[in-house]
Amino acid sequence: MAVLQVENIYKRFGRTEVLKGIDFSLEKGEVLVIIGASGSGKTTLMRCLNFLEKPDVGRIMVDDKVLFDTEAAETLKESEIREKRLHFGLVFQDFNLFPQYSVLKNITLAPTLLKKGTAQEIEANAKRLLEQVGLLNKMSAYPCELSGGQKQRVAIARALALNPEILCFDEPTSALDPELTGEVLKVIKELKDTGSTMIVVTHEMEFARNVADKVVFMADGVIEEMGTPEEVFGNPQSPKTQAFLRKAHEGF
Amino acid sequence: MVTLKLFGLTLLFSLPLGLLISFGSMSKFKPVKYLFKFLVWVVRGTPLMLQLILFYFGPGLLVNMLEGAGVNNLLTDMMRALNQADSLIIAVIAFVINYACYFSEIYRGGIEGIPVGQYEAGYVLGMTKTQIFFKVVLMQVVKRIVPPMSNEIITLVKDTSLARTITVYEVIWAAQDFVRNDGILWPLFYTGAFYLLFSGLLTLIFGFIEKKLDYYRG
Ligand SMILES: Nc1ncnc2c1ncn2[C@@H]1O[C@H](COP(=O)(O)OP(=O)(O)O)[C@@H](O)[C@H]1O
Ligand SMILES: [Mg+2]
């Protein structure tokens, strides 16, 4: 049974059509990797899933329950949107940690505000997550004291603290120095091994090939090609995919 | 002492009023937004001295006009009350409005300077708008506005002397009386020392606050 079904998503900003009918589905425990040139609509798609943008047309279903449907006439209240977006987590390209709080507080803030348990439970869980991303020794540090790679790992722990069913990553390593990407990709790889369902937008082709169960190549707001890593990387069908991969191979 | 009273009351009322004005000038409802922007433009674009004189003489002239026209409503009553009010109260009103407008711009700069990513991180973590404002944004705004606020508040210390134009017996005027009556100059130095001490004290306090907020960057 598909944990996520995305159907016919359209989104435009003014005159620019950014998403022109996106369809895909995701099984529990699967990792979907989205690749594509800059401007092809990857970020907008992630934002639609996390209710940061509202699609003009389309339907989003999680566990066969409709979360969002432009066919349904009702408009969602803010409280309903809040509840629905908790099915998803989002890790941003530029981390967006809260600078005034310690690493630990960054992770415990939202669960505390949402009353996801007692203070002790929330803190114990946060520490377990920090251990998982290898940063338990940094729990009292402030974000400004961390390297980019460490910041992103804290951001991942922060997203995990709310137990999202589907964790989305929007170019999690694009803001990092090349030598720091490895530690973040390693954490994502480990999450896959523990069965997390994830959608990862990335330009790291080597990583995409290793971690993906399914690869989507987006171009100009549509899914140009979709398949297993072997299919998309090994034997791309569309000329656009071939051109993109050739360029990626030569280095950006 | 009159100068301190004027200073304290102005801060007490203009700090919260400024926040309201800043919300008004950031309103998504265009008429409200432009109304507040206009107010801020007028108040910041004209001298405080002129505003003091307006609040001092304006009500009396209006009362005459309204009574002459036979109008006798709430506005007339309000103007009558203002006309009979103590000049210190008039000064406080003018100062509060003036400083609230300056503060509102500082607040606005502080709030608008917070990256949208901070709000979005809060949203994605399921927080409400109110939680995001108080738990995520507010502290960062405070950190940003302390330096410009401290400048503005130290300016207020010295601006209090303008209240004399509408017969508020503030500290320079008091000193001047000594100069005139007793033919001695040194009371003026005392007032100078008073201002220096006052603004020095404020500088220390704000320096302390800035230091307290210095535990993080960004
Ligand atoms: N808020 C917005 N307003 C206007 N245009 C936008 C907005 N967000 C994205 N776009 C446009 O949508 C297109 C796709 O952007 P994006 O989803 O960020 O692509 P990608 O993440 O694949 O680089 C770009 O042309 C971008 O300029
Ligand atoms: Mg993007």
Image: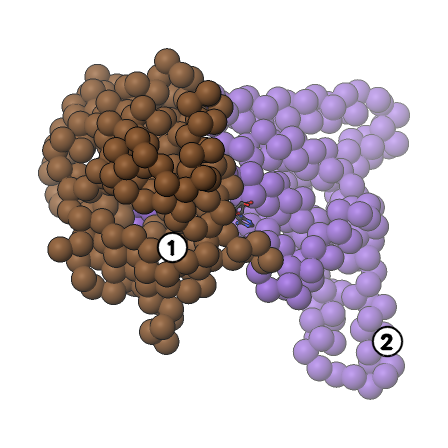
Chain colours: A brown, B purple
Query: In the depicted view, which residue is nearer to us: A47 or B112?
Result: A47
Extreme bottom residue here?
B70
Quick one: quadrant of the N terminus of chain A? Answer: bottom left
Q: Is residue B181 visible?
A: yes
Q: Which mark is residue B10?
A: none
Left or right of residue B63, residue A119 in this image: left
Tell me whether the residue at label 1 lies in contact with that at label 2, contact meaning CB atoms closer than 8 angstroms. Answer: no
Query: Could you tell whether A175 is left or right of A200 in the image?
Result: right
Left or right, residue B32 beside residue A8: right
**Relative side of B72 to B213, left or right:** right
Label 2 is placed on what type of residue? Met
The residue indicated by pointer 2 is B65
Query: Where does the image place residue B174, in percent across and percent down from the top left?
Result: 76, 36
Check mark 1 vs ligand 1: CB closer than 8 Å? yes or no.
no
Q: Please report, as a chain letter, where disc 1 is located.
A: A
Measured from the top left, where is residue A117 in percent x and y?
Answer: 13, 45
From mark 1 to mark 2, how far is it between C-alphas?
A: 69 Å
Examine the image and state in which quarter residue A146 appears: top left
- Residue type, numbered disc 1: Ile
Number of residues whose C-alpha sits closer than 10 Å to that of mark 1, classed few (under 14), some (14–19) or many (20 or more): some
- Where residue B173 sits in the image (x, y, percent)? 79, 37
| Residue B185 in which image quadrant | top right
At 64% across and 63% down in the image, what residue appears? B30
Residue behind mark 1: A22
Residue B60 in which image quadrant: bottom right
Q: Secondary structure at mark 2?
A: helix
What's the chain of the residue with tag 2? B
